[in-house]
Structures are given as C-alpha cells and as structure tokens.
Amino acid sequence: MLWSLIKILIFVALVVALTFGASQLMESGGALRLAVGDLELNLGPLQAVIAALLLILAVWLFLKIVGFLFAVLRFLNGDETAVSRYFDRSREQKGLRALSEGMMALAAGEPRTAMSRAAKARKYLGQNAMTTLLNAQAAQQAGDSRRAQESYKLLLEDERTRFVGVRGLLKQKLDEGDTDTALALAQKAFEINPKHSETQDILLKLQADLHDWSGARSTLSAKMKSGALPKAVYKRRDAVLALQTAKDVFDENASIEAREAAILANKQSPDLIPAAAMAARSYLAQGNKKYATRVLKKAWEAEPHPDLAAAFAEIEPDETPAERLKRFRTLTAIHPDHDETRMLIAELSLAAEDFPGARRALGDIVARHPTQRALTIMAAVERGEGGDEAVVRGWLARALTAPRGPQWCCDNCQTVHATWAPICDNCGGFDTLSWREPTQKSTPSATGTELLPLIVGAPAARPADPMDEDVIDEKAVEPSTK
C-alpha cells in the first residue's frame, strides 16, 4: 500500500516536472538552458525532448530496481510476492498431480501406492480435506484401521468435512461389528445431513437390529419426508414397526399404548397378516368381538392365511366343532375356491367328524397341488372313514416328500421362516418376508420316494379266487403225470 502511494507521488512529480519544463521551453523561445553548479547546458527543442525521455527511462528503471529490491526483501520475510507465487504455483501443480495419481491408484485397488501419493500431495498442498480423505480411504482399503481412523478424525475438525468424517468412522465400526458405536455415529451423521439416503438406511437397519422400534419409526418418517420413500411403502413399513412395538400386547402388564399400536398397525396396512391377527386379539382383549371379526374378514379378503383362521377361532373359544364350522362360514364365504379356504373347511369338518364333507372340501387339491398339509388331511379323512391302514400310510408317505406349501420366505435370500418377523434372520433384510411357495426345488434323497414301499408296507392280502386255485392245482399236478 505504501509503495503504491510512493509510485503515485513520483508519477505526479514527473508530470509536474514535464509541465514545468514545457513552460520554460516555451518562454525561452525553443531553447532550454540547464545550470547545475558550474556546469551549464543549452539544449535545443529536440535535445530537450530526448533528455526528457531519457529521464523518464531512468526513473522507470530506478522504480523497477527499487521494486525488485522490495520484492526480494518481502520474499525473504515470507510475504507473498511474484516470486513466491511462482513457486506456489509449481508446488500446487505437483501436489494436484500427486493427488490425481493417488485417486487413480485407489480406484485401481492399489492402496499402498495411493497412500504414498497422498503423503506426497500433503507435502506440496499441506494438510487439506482432499489429501486427508485420500489417505483415510487408502488406509481403510489397505486394512490399516488405526491410520484411517486418525485421518477421519481430522476431518471432524472442519464443519464442511465433518459429515464425511463421521460416515468414514461409521463404516469402520460397521466393518468391525461394533453396532453400539455405529448407531451413535449413524445418529450423528443423520443430525448433520438428515436427507442423506444411505445414512437413513444404515440408521434404520441398526435401529431395527437393536429393536429400537420407536427410533426406527422416526427415521422412516424422515425418509418419507425427504422423498426417498413412496408413501405407500412408508405406510406398510411403519405398520411393521408399529406391530413390533406392540409385540407384548397380550402380556399381563401390557399397556394401553401397546394395544393401540397393534390396532394402528392394522389400520395403516390392513393386508399385513400379522398386524391383522394381533389387532384382532387386541380387540378381543378389550371385549370387542365385532371389530375383531371385521379386521380378520378384511385381511382374509386380501389373502387367506392360517394365522387369520387361528385368530378367528379365538373369538369363540368354547364353541363346539359343529358351531365353529357354522360360524366360520362368514369367513370361508370369502374366496371359497382358494386352497387355504378349502383346506380350512376340511380341517373344521374333520373336527366335526364330517369326513365326507372334508373330502368334498379338499376336492382336487391332492391331485392338482399336493402339499404336506393337504395330504395329511387326506390321510385323516381316510382313517376317519375307516379306510385301509395301508392307504392311510400311503397318504402319509406321500406327505413326507410333498412340498410344504406357502411359507414365510425372504424375498432377498429365499430363507424359509417358521413365523413372520420384520427382519430376516439370515440376510438381515427389513420387511422382506412374504407368504408364498419357497423357490427351492427338492432333490431325490435316500429318505424320499425310494423308501416309500418300506414306509407304506405290504398291501392287505386279496382273497383268493376259486378259479385261480383250480389253475394252480392243475399246474402242480401236470409234472407228476409226465
């Protein structure tokens, strides 16, 4: 600033000097007389102009020399100068080149090379976010968790890079299996950037794994509000979480809030079978059989299911088999041709000892879609009607190798579960269980159809025909007569 002011003053002085010289030149009639001590010079107009130009050139050179000396002094003092800017540009170019080489090495799966390039880039560029992040990711890829953790912690110091640092530490803890620390980090990352989809998914999974259902519902709501989840999917998954919140709904000390949570889950997703069954039992606990019946009928309209039938049976636990068969007609009238409905009627008929009715209800299921349940019912029908024991064992033998029918199957890993759960025990998928036939195909084994004759046993002996006995006697006599 001071040097700029000095240059302006010198420029003004030159202008004043030139103006004064021009006025003197005009007054002297075109000649210029200069007297310096004992030295006297007389200059003509052309000589005066040349002298003025030389003076300007000398002053310019003087200013440049002085400016260079000041620049050297500032450079030696550490201030920014053209010289320092030149060296800075050179260092920056080398640092950026090392940084790009490190990123390419990291993408190519060469973490050691990436770490060396990160160190070189840090040497030229200093400790900045890019070099720190490159070093952290390279160390993590190389398996150096301590070095990666130190680098990620450096990113926490800057507000602009704090989210990246938290996510890096979060992934480390997930890889290490430290779910408690990972949950705290996921919550911190969610606070910093609540609209980040991956962070939402990680936090939701951790909360579900740790059975923090209320926290998971809050995260799910934020995910829907950010536009990352369709409203229909949100309603179903929120119903799943509400259902888990109310899993102790039938305990002796179950709260009213827990009972209401089961009812809310059913209202949000009426076709969610476990929610419908639990909501019906919640209504029964309140003595409201009418609402329980309505809930189960609506769920049965969506899909017939054994759990719904079991809950429907609990509405009148003390009724006789005949009364139950009659009451169930309000349920079985919905989807009467569905396999589940027909097998349910057959089971109710068996309980009422109406064996012909059970056979009629089964119809062609045992031929069209034989399952363990259908074949077992058929064996019970045969036994109830007094059929041959070998026939009964034959149906049971077929049931041993028949498909199990619809089960709770994970849509991700195809694992079969005995009961419904919000999270797959095998792959950890959330809300991935559906009621359907397993996709796995059975293969022949030593306990399959090869051993059916041993399981069934020999059929009952057929009475001998008199004509057959005569033929046998004739064949036995012929050799002796020859």
Image (cartoon, grey):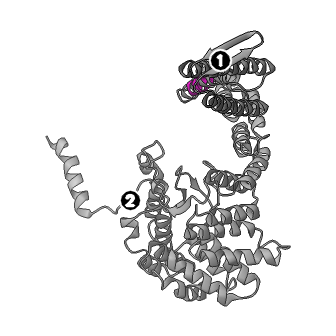
**Disc number placed over residue 58 in the picture, else none:** 1
Identify the residue under disc 2: 461
User: Residue 415, percent across and down?
Assistant: 55, 51
Q: Nearer the viewer, residue 196 or 472?
A: 196
**Disc number placed over residue 464 in the picture, else none:** none
Q: Is residue 51 left or right of residue 373?
A: right
> For residue 417, what is the image quadrant?
bottom right
Disc 1 to disc 2, C-alpha distance:
137 Å
Start-end of magenta stretch: 95-102
Residue lying at 64% horizontally and 54% vertically, measured from the top left: 196
User: Residue 89, percent across and down?
Assistant: 62, 24
How dense is the environment of label 2, judged by Cα within 10 Å: few (below 14), some, or many (20 and up)? few
Residue lying at 62% horizontally and 65% vertically, measured from the top left: 224
* Residue extending farthest right: 253
* Residue extending farthest front: 29
Looking at the image, is mark 1 or mark 2 nearer the viewer? 1
Which badge, 1 or 2, is on the more N-terminal residue? 1
The C terminus: image quadrant: top left
Q: Nearer the viewer, residue 451 or 408?
A: 408
Amino acid at pointer 2: Ala
Work out whether 276 lies above or below 427: below
